[in-house]
Image (cartoon, rainbow, N blue to C red):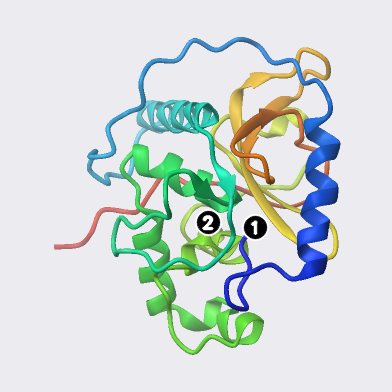
Amino acid sequence: MLFRGGGAQTRSERAKIQRVAPAFHGKKFLALALSLGTAVSAALAQTRPSTPNEHQQFLDKLVKAAVERTNHSVKYVSTYVHLDYPGGDVPADTGVCSDEIIRAYRVVGVDLQKEVHEDIAKNWTDYALNTKWHQTHPDSSIDHRQVPNLMVFFARKGDSLPISLLAKEYLPGDIVTWDLGGGVPHIGMVVNAKSSESGRPLIVHNIGQGPKMEDVLFSWKITGHYRYFGPLPRAH
């Protein structure tokens, strides 16, 4: 979750996160052990996979990158930060829920900052920037970090999948968004590990205590379910 208004959360929004986060970090979640190597180089070219085998390879690398994020210590900071473009990021030890998705995709060569910015610039009316934040032009420092913008982008450029109450419908690499209550959005990624207690797929997300892998798929109201393989090849 990222909030505007000088970049800071409102008092009610901050209280919502403070109430929700401890409720889950106080529980004991058991996950299957994962044996993971080092992350894929961020220098990979942005090439959209085209075959089923390439799709699976892409998702495997994406999930590996997301799970690797749980080894990092990240302080939840939602203030506005001016970013370089393209390839800009907030300080490595800070971030919000959307930054974990952005960082995982960067490892597999997809720069969501660039992709979202370009899509907003070309399709301004498809995004609620003006009505939601009274924004008059694209902002490459923040637009890709806003969950509502990512929802529009993934629906436009990826696959918008059914919202289901069946855990088996959520596959590794899928992006899920939630409403934490009161319209506060959240985002995370399904990974290739399951809870030994519920059997549900685990989610990598940051709800206030850094990137974690937890059994939270059905903890809040699901508002979106997506699968995104990166941008289509550029026409020459």
Quadrant (top left/top right/bottom left/bottom right) for the C terminus: bottom left
Task: Report the residue at 58% width, 77% height from top.
Answer: 6
- Relative image position of residue 15 (x, y in whole percent): 82, 59
Where 103 falls versus 213 (above or below)?
Answer: below
Where 207 falls versus 231 (above or below)?
Answer: above
Q: What amino acid is at disc 2?
A: Phe
Quadrant (top left/top right/bottom left/bottom right) for the N terminus: bottom right
Mark 1 is surrounded, within 10 Å at the Cα level, by few (under 14), some (14 to 19) or many (20 or more) other residues, namely: many
- Relative image position of residue 203 (x, y in whole percent): 66, 33
Ranked by sequence position, the earlier of labels 2 and 1 is 1
In-image side of 187 versus 109 (left or right): right
Q: Secondary structure at mark 2?
A: helix
Q: Which residue is mark 1?
A: 1
- The image quarter in which residue 30 lies: top right
Q: Which residue is mark 2?
A: 154
Would residue 134 be seen by someone viewing this image from the given angle?
yes
- Relative image position of residue 72 (x, y in whole percent): 50, 32
Label annotation for residue 43: none
Would residue 165 be seen by someone viewing this image from the given angle?
no
Q: Secondary structure at mark 1?
A: loop
In-image side of 69 versus 200 (left or right): left
